[in-house]
Amino acid sequence: MAVQRPVAVNLTAPARPPALADIAAAACLPGEEVLHGLGVTRKGLSAREAAERLARWGPNAVSSHQARLLPVLWHQLRSPLLCLLLVAAAASYLVGERSDAVIIGVIVALSVGLGFVNEYRAEKAAEALHGQVRHQAVVVRGGRPAEVEVTALVPGDIVELRLGDIVPADVRLLEVTGLECAESVLTGESMPVAKDTEAASAGAALAELSGCALMGTVVHAGSARGVVVATGAVTEFGKIAAGLGTHQLETGFQVGLRRFSMLLVYVAGALTTSIFVINVVLHKPLMDALLFSLAIAVGITPQLLPAVVSTSLAAGSRRMSRLGVLVKRLVCIEDLGDVDVLFTDKTGTLTQGRIEFTRSLPADGEDALAVLRWGLLCTETGGDDGPAAGGNPLDAALWKAPAAQRQRQALAGYTQVAVVPFDHKRRMVSTVVRDSAGVTVLITKGAPESVLERCANVPEATRKALDAEFAAGNRVIAVATRETPGLDHPAAADEHHLRLAGLLVFLDPPKPDAAKAMSRLAGLGIAVKIVTGDNPVVAAKVCHDLGLTTATALTGADLAALDDTRLATAIAHTTVFARVSPEDKARVVRIQRTTGRDVAFLGDGVNDALALHAADVGISVDSATDVAKDAADVILLRKDLNVLADGVVEGRRIFANTIKYVLMGTSSNFGNMFSAAGASLFLGFLPMLPSQILLNNLLYDTSQLAIPTDHVDEAQLRRPSHWDIGFIRRFMVCFGPISSVFDFATFGVMLWVFHSGPAQFRTGWFVESLATQTLVIFAIRTRRFPFWRSHPSLPLTLAALGVTVIGAVLPATPLAHTLGFRPLPPTFFAALAAMVVCYLALIEYGKRLFYRTLPTTPPTAPRPSADRRYLQRRTARFSTAGGPGHQSRLAGGS
């Protein structure tokens, strides 16, 4: 089943500037010539020029997410059993059984129509959902940096690249500061590649274009500015996008559906073959035997399962969107409900995320205002007005502080000469500034542990002050300086023999409702563990304030000393992982998954991307870095664990309702078809006509379309649920025969009490079969006592009762003769009521015995391939959702 169409990859190239065929041609030219060829200056395009180019060359997209009528219709028609039934109906029409053929055709058309309408509505919901996911790029328009949608980039745009960015198009670099790009997605090169602004030689390979940054690659270090040469399908990434294939990676939920479908194929094949052989051996008409056997096969298959699942997921996505949770693929909703271990960062999740600068702590012989001034001057991206769009949040907090505003005049006397950008290994940034007297100073700012080990002398009083701030749960940044005459091109190697200026203290208090959210997740059976780059003392303090147990905290150094086996044991007893690298985070997640637990990772930084990819469910937030949002399966519109808890509950609710349909459909259908096979042994006629079997199945399935609206017991929401084919098989084998017992009782009543002929016999079994298999939903939908301790939703109640009434009334309508029905005596309905009550009572008793003996060991969920998922997420970033206008432009329309 497919509840969301695969992305449609468009490889037709739109129009492009004639001076530049592709990035390889631009790479061979100096930067100024590329700018001239694209008709742009270093100040970038104006808003009007950008709009004109977007209309001419189309959006910067290589794929589109759209609900398309024909693929959805084909999905409904591609069932082999359905095709065989249509062929058999056509053959029946040709040999004279025209009325039966027409009835079968109409019923099949109605079934296909129901599935089509519901699945297409789900497709439209998926399209709208995709359209809410946004990815931004920083461009220079009209001389000023601004954030725009990635899909709105056009050739000629001047873009800024920073640490963690995914390169949004094929870019010819104009300015570079220590830029390194991870290009494995295109070239297979595992190590980051250093970049410069030099022109490449003609015919250079893709991996040798050092003066270019290519769409889909990741900025591993440094920063740069460049001009967009190619966008969308004409980029190098766009050209190979088709190689990713159009089939989305299966989630654990989809794997379960596929295995369930195979179970039905085996059961249907066995029953169909045996019934056909029995009827032929008993010398019944060949065409009738064939149609009956095929109808049995169709009857045992939950034909509207795709529609039920699609409806559940579409309704769930709308509810989750209102709750502040967006999922990139609808089926990920189910996987979110499976989570039982959550790794999360601290800042903004457990804390308020509103980082505020509080004070400067000068080292011996320094001045507090000087520490603040050096901190303001050591800003990686920005100018006299502070950090530019998309800058570091600590820098932004520092510049917003009232004390910083009073330093503006003092800062005017300094000029920034060069920058050594921040990276997650050094955990520092350095700048070289020159004052009005011509004195050049190297300023280094970053994690205290990293900065202090590069300082020549660190006062003991400063170390004690640092420990006190950590113990209080504050975030601290160290600032150090060194005069460096003539140093215009600094590197990381120059960060040594520094003089400590002092400490900058920031406050990020815990959220008022964080403790309640943690308690709620614990009530859902989810263990929460903190993974952070912060100091372990700070992380432990925050966790302690929120009531988390923090018996031990492991650091990156501790992790390095443990092999995988010992780490797996340690994770079970550890709540806080602090001062960890991106690789450490991914390793912790990977090891946790090997224990059979379903793992979610919540993160919003570039250093979280590896762990997001490694988790069963990657979760990010709308304000996260692009690389984090790209790596995630689920995006929270608010960085709040309560929002995540809402998403988990919704995922479990949808899964529970889907399983209700599966359990009810397989057990009752299996029982009915088993009854039909048994009846064929002693009856001289078919126990039910093929058209009647299909009509029964259609009415029954129609009533089950209300299952997505049903309530779910709290007990089912308090623990993760997984697909368990063994459980479904046991349920089918246990409850199917119970249904058959009452079918055979109906056979006896019709033959020996009412002495019915073939038509009335079929009518009686039709009414009884429809009533029992429809009303049994009230018992199967809950493990508790129905109605008294667990109430079904009103739509489900009305649908089940309504279909039962329709089945009972149908033999008395003008359609009865056409459908092969005969009126039933009033006393039959009294017998029917007694059988339904006894049937539901026996089901209720069997349900209690069944769940009492149920194994308690949960099944191991299937693990999707992280590498393939990584590529699909990357492609999805450069995609659009919309109507035909989007599609035509993607295909090259002007």
Image: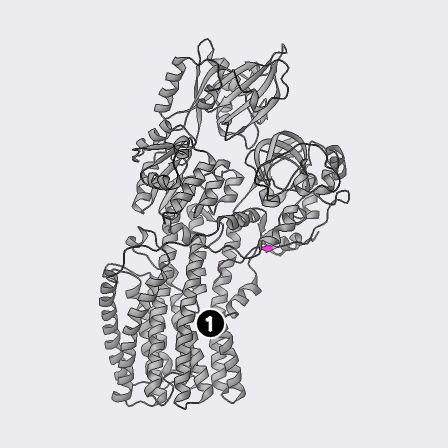
Please determine whether, in this image, residue 461 is positioned above or below residue 333.
above
In the image, 173 versus 625, the foreground residue is 173
Residue 686 position within the rendered picture, expressed as x and y whole percent measured from the top left:
38, 86
Residue 365, placed above or below residue 355: above
Residue found 33% across the figure and 60% down from its top: 793
Residue 406 seen from this side: no
* Image quadrant assignment for residue 484: top right
Magenta residues span 2-8
Please indicate whether residue 449 sits to the left or right of residue 877 in the image: left
Q: Amino acid at mark 1?
A: Ser
Q: Which residue is mark 1?
A: 111
Q: Confirm whether the magenta stretch covers residue 428.
A: no
Q: Nearer the viewer, residue 890 or 432?
A: 432
Residue 779: percent from the left, percent from the top?
28, 65
* Residue closest to the eye, 745 or 266: 266
Give the secondary structure at mark 1.
helix
Q: Name the spot of residue 722 as percent of width and height, x first.
A: 36, 56
Q: Is residue 7 magenta?
A: yes
Secondary structure mostly taken by the magenta-highlighted segment of the chain: loop
Q: Residue at x 29, y 45 (%)?
A: 523
**Location of residue 520 by image quarter:** top left
At 28% from the left and 69% from the top, the residue drawn is 734
Instruction: Indicate the position of residue 250 as horizontal and vertical percent values.
Output: 48, 56
**Which residue is at a point 40% across and 75% down the rendered structure image?**
270
